[in-house]
Image (cartoon, helix red, strand yellow):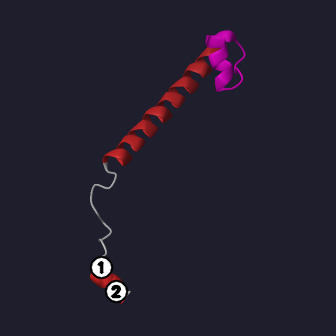
Amino acid sequence: MWRLWCYALGRKEGRKKREADAVAVIRTLILLSYLVTNCFIIAGVIRHWDNQKTVPTVDSAIMGVL
């Protein structure tokens, strides 16, 4: 499974097996940090979704003028 995960991250880099595994671990940590960051961004967007009405509602009286 580890071999497949390494190939999913990109081809294995390094002159030795241990060095290639270290590169795969670093790539995994980078991927996880991107995933966590995106989850926080999405959670913030959902939390503040339409929190304050910034666009005023249009009354029917104003609609006649427009």
Residue bearing mark 1: 60
On the image, which quarter does residue 9 sit in? top right
Judged from the image, the secondary structure of the residue bearing numbered disc 1 is helix
Q: Along the line of sight, which residue is nearer the eye, 49 or 26?
A: 49
Q: x and y percent of residue 7 in the render? A: 69, 20
On the image, which quarter does residue 17 sit in? top right
User: Residue drawn 42% across and 37% down?
Assistant: 39
Q: x and y percent of residue 54 in the render? A: 30, 66
Q: Does 40 lie within the magenta span?
A: no
Q: Quadrant of the C terminus?
A: bottom left
Q: x and y percent of residue 6 in the render? A: 64, 19
User: Residue drawn 66% across and 15% down?
Assistant: 4
On the image, which quarter does residue 20 sit in? top right
Q: Looking at the picture, does residue 57 appear above or below residue 26?
A: below
Q: Does 4 lie within the magenta span?
A: yes
Q: Would you say the residues marked 1 and 2 are in contact, meaning their CB atoms lie under 8 Å apart?
A: yes
Amino acid type of the residue tagged 1 in the rendering? Ser
- Magenta segment boundaries in residue numbering: 1-18
Give left or right: position of 27 versus 12.
left
Numbered label attached to residue 64:
2
